[in-house]
Every structure is written in structure tokens, then in C-alpha cells.
Image: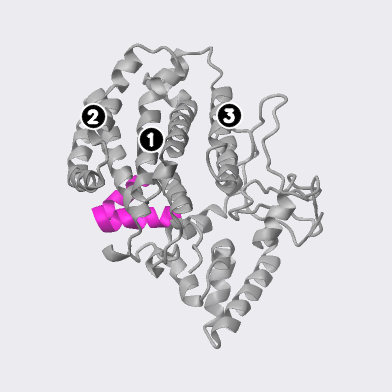
Amino acid sequence: MKRPPRLPYCGTCKTMGERYGQQTRLLLNHDTVFLAELLLEYGGTPEWSQAYRSFNCMSMPKNGDIPVAFDFAAAATIVLAHHRVEDQRIDSGKRRWAFVSGLLSPSYRKATAMLRAWDFPLDDLTRMLASQSEREAHLESISQVAEPTAAATGIFFQHGARVIGRADMAEAMYRAGHRFGFLIYALDAWEDRARDEKRGDFNPLLKLPNVDARAEILAATADLEREIPPAIALRLRANVEERLGLRPRVLTHRCRKTIRERWKDAVALARSIRQKEGVIVFAAGCVAAYLVPHQMRSADSLRHGLGLGLNLMALGAVLSSAAPPPPPPPGPSGYQPHVAIPPGSTSGFRSSGGGSGCCNCGSCTQCCCTAECCSEGCCDACSSCGDCGDCCSSCSC
């Protein structure tokens, strides 16, 4: 079976629920999902159980069906969450963190047992993370204080390559993990500046006001792009620039179609599904396609489409579609967000439908159309994945 959309995200989430309990799925974060995606990229694509499809969040895989990439990423998520909780418990001294630590302890013990079975250097990891407080007390630079996070992430990436049978990639994965760990730390510090200043919490960027944090983050992103596959690097660049405010957040925008146009598209999509399956509940397909058109396009049956009612991301899409898009924040003077232009593409395209909107397909996270033109390279990317219909009625490059 072809790899389903959002498989690294949903696969890691469901593996955590199966291995460590449903409550641990709240700990899922995009950092370890990124690790899972790289492990899938380098370790090959196994046969996927239907339980990993993203339509039904409550459908869980069986233990024997869990790929090692998800097992490793799930264990990494639990262990890193434990260390973050312990750090908060020690620094704040608040009882709620002690309570959370107690709830997480059984899952942490299971995750560490799993990692030790893979000969993971847990003691080295613990020593490295324990040096964080000392580094914060003697702050020298952003690189110096971010080193525990960077080194710990590098260790996970390096050992993950060995676990999937790609020891030849171990050193390259360590370099990628180290830069990604620095990127995680610097981006979090960037986004938390106002909150930390208000609360009086430690933030290296407040202690080092002369550091050009945005330049450091973009440099780390450029370094990381050289270590990872181009398709993943493109999405990484888009996400980083969104978080820095250098481009509009694609997921906060919605397609500005009339109700009539949106219903017409929903009926067409439902008919295409009906042709695959014969006589089905046509009205149900129309309603699902109208509410969550992007998710329904990836469905291969009505059963999958109706399962979207138990999908948290689809429910969030329904709720967010009611809000108008916020105006994009201005970027720094003279800076143009990086856009990877596919070979043969032109400088832009026009929306013949005269509308505006956005495209969320995997290869086109930067697509954000206007009535006049779109981002460079966006037309080819949208056309290649078939999702341009949400942006405009057609492209003419």
C-alpha cells in the first residue's frame, strides 16, 4: 500500500497509544514526528496496517504490526517528555509537575526498557540533559546553552539510523539531529520571548540581546537542509519561515469559495467515490466532502471518509474554517522567503477562477494564492499533487 498522508504523525501517535497508554498521545510533538519521517525515508516503506490510516484516531494498530521506526520515535517522545517534566519540576518546585511526573513514570519505565533493548546510550543522554541548568547559570552563547538539546537530538537520530538497519547513515543522522536540536531550542526561545519576559523565566535571547536570533535560526535551517531529503527540506523551510513570521501561515487560511461552488466540488468528489464502490450513501459522501474537502480527497472509500468523524485533525479543520484568515505579519526589510522552484516552472501563475485561497498538499506548503498571481513554483507543485482545486479553478503558467 502506498504510504498514506500524515503517516509519520498518525503512526507515531497511535504507536504511543498502543505501547504506553492513550494518555501519552497528548505528548506527541512534531520534533519526534520529524525523526519518524526520516527513519521511514531511509529505512524503506513497509506494508502498512489500515489502523495507521489517519481517518479514525481511535483505530489502533496491533503490537505485531508496529514498524520499528514508529516504535523508536514513540519511545523517544516519552523519554524526552519525562526529562522536560523533571526539569520543570526541579526548576519550579510546583506540585503539579510532581503529579505529572508520577503519571508519566510507568510509561517512562517501559520506554527506557525498550531503548535499552536497542542498546541506546541512556546514561549519556541523561548526563547531557542534566547539564542544562549549569549552562543556563553560566550563559555564554546560544550555541553553548542549546548544546544539551542539540546533542540529545543528535544521539536519537544517530541511534535511530542503527535501529532501522542503516548504520551507514549514523554519522549523517547525528549531524542532522544536532542541527535540528539547535533549531528546536532556538525557535522555542524565539517564540517564548514575550511570555518568558512577563513571567520572569529564563530565556537565552533575553539574556543575549545582541544575538541575531533570526539569522541563527535561518543559518541552522540552511545547514539542516543539506543533510536531509529535498522534499522534507522544502517543508522544513516553509514551517520555519512561518514560525519566524516571514511568510503567512498556510493552515490559518481558507479557500474563499462561495457555498454554491464548494457544494458543487463536494458533489463531484462524492460521485468519484461512488464510481469506485457502486451504490453507496451518496448524501453522506457529499456532506463529508463539503465539511473537510482536503481530507476527503485522500480517502479511497466512503468508509474512510465517514471515519473522519473520529479524526481530531478533521474536526479541527471544520472549526477553523469559520474564522477569517489573519493578515500576514510583515517580514524583515529586504528578506524574501525561500521558495524552491521546480525545474521548468515559470515565475508565477494566474488564478483563472479569480478567487484566492491556499493549498495544503505535501509538496506545496507555500502555496497562497491571490486573484493576480501566486508564489513562484507553486503552480507546478499544486498541479503535481492534484490539490490546486482549493486554490483556484485552474492554473495557467
- The answer to which of marks 3 and 1 sits earlier in the sequence is 1
- The answer to which of 290 and 65 lies nearer the viewer is 65
| Residue to which mark 3 is pinned | 218
Identity of the residue drawn at 60% across and 44% down:
234
On the image, the x and y values in percent for residue 194 come to 47, 24
For the residues labelled 3 and 2, the Cα–Cα distance comes to 32 Å
At numbered mark 3, what does the secondary structure look like: helix, strand or loop? helix
On the image, the x and y values in percent for residue 93 come to 21, 25
Going by the image, does 183 lie left or right of 286?
left
Point out the frontmost of discs 3 and 1: 1
Say which amino acid is labelled 1. Thr
Identity of the residue drawn at 47% across and 36% down:
176
For the residues labelled 1 and 2, the Cα–Cα distance comes to 22 Å
| Residue to which mark 2 is pinned | 89
Is 23 included in the stretch rendered in magenta? yes
Identity of the residue drawn at 77% across and 50% down:
345
| Residue to which mark 1 is pinned | 153
At numbered mark 2, what does the secondary structure look like: helix, strand or loop? helix
On the image, the x and y values in percent for residue 128 come to 29, 26
- The answer to which of 192 and 300 lies nearer the viewer is 300
On the image, the x and y values in percent for residue 305 come to 50, 71
Going by the image, does 136 lie left or right of 290?
left
Say which amino acid is labelled 2. Arg
